Amino acid sequence: MHALPTKLPTRALFWDIDGTLLVTGRAGMMAWERAFAAFTGGRAFPTVRPDGLTDHQIAAWLLGNPSPYETPGEEEQRAVASLVARYEVELAGALPLRQGRVLDNVRPVLEWLREASPGMLSWLVTGNTLAGGTAKLRHYGLSEFFRSGPLADTDHAEALPLAGSFSSRVEPRANIVRRALQMAQARLPGLRASEALVIGDTPHDIEGAHAIGVPVLAVATNTHTREELAAHGPWMVAEVLPNAGAFARTVRSGHKG
Ligand SMILES: [Mg+2]
């Protein structure tokens, strides 16, 4: 157990994608099923999948690792990387086949951040791979809010990678948050963990953030209820992402209110 992090006025936002910014109508699941079938020559897809795994953890689990929460050896990492690459190809084809959506208040909040709070870092911190996350955000029209380059560079903006920290191998989810915090500290010298804020929808998001001292705004917009999320001690739990005005107060707040 870790002590629950304190929250100071936020200088760096770390956004989860699935169930927090958007839902894909299970396009991701369709992509995993297709990738798994191609990769294994048609083996039956497991009916139950652990919730809240990173993409590389999902692949490791599909390949038979029963508890892919730690860092395995290089041989397993290579097999996982192959399956993940196939998933990324299938995902691009699956996204248009399913009806997903951007979740409530997300776009107005991202617009507020861009227009009224340009000094605040607003990055993706996600168990998606860079290619998978990019495909999802482009499909749902949110990639413009997370470009890693200067806003002035509009000619090639679509080609810029998204800003943030992604799954790149089988590893504990907290490593992804730790990398984000280190990158953010390089941009904002002196940034403390309590000045970052993870926004996520699963207990794994909360635990991964708490492991390195980052407070969490948990949103019950996907499969987990407020009560389930509250049991993990996030700084705040909301039914949906607060609207732009309430979100502004939330990030500026340094006290539980
Ligand atoms: Mg999520």
Image: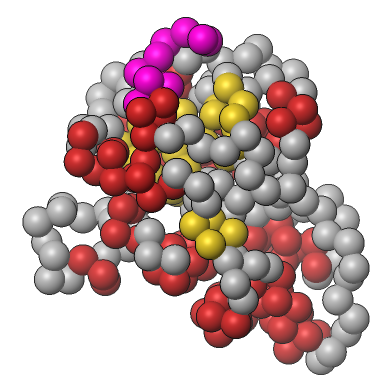
Look at the image and give the residue range highlighted in magenta: 248-257
- Image quarter where the N terminus lies is top right
Between 6 and 61, the one lying in front of the other is 6
For the question of whether residue 253 can be seen, the reply is yes
Q: What is the residue that sits farthest to the left in this orientation?
A: 152
User: How is the structure coloured here?
Assistant: secondary structure
Query: Horizontal placement of 172 versus 214: left or right?
Result: right
Q: Residue 57 placed where, x, y %? A: 70, 57
Of residues 202 and 127, the one drawn nearer to the viewer in this rendering: 202
Tell me residue 148's x, y (percent): 27, 54
How many numbered marks have been drawn onto this rendered protein structure?
0
- Location of residue 14 by image quarter: top left
The structure residue drawn at horizontal position 44% and vertical position 66%, both measured from the top left corner, is 140
Residue 244's quadrant in the figure? top left
> Where does residue 91 sit, x and y in percent of width and height?
58, 77
Q: In this view, does 102 lie above or below 84?
A: above
* Relative height, residue 191 to residue 109 (above, below): above
On the picture, is 16 further left or further right than 188? right
The answer to whether any part of residue 178 appears in the image is no
In the rendered structure, the answer to whether residue 237 lies left or right of residue 8 reads: right
Task: Give the image location of residue 187, x and y in percent.
Answer: 25, 35
Decide which of 64, 252 is in the foreground and name it.
252
Residue 78 is left or right of residue 168, and the answer is right
Residue 29 is inside the magenta segment: no
In percent of the image, x 67 and y 48: which residue is there? Answer: 222
Rendered residue at 57%/38% (across/down)? 240
Please report the residue visible at 52 percent of the width from the left and 10 percent of the height from the top: 256
For the residue pair 85 and 115, the one nearer the viewer reads as 115
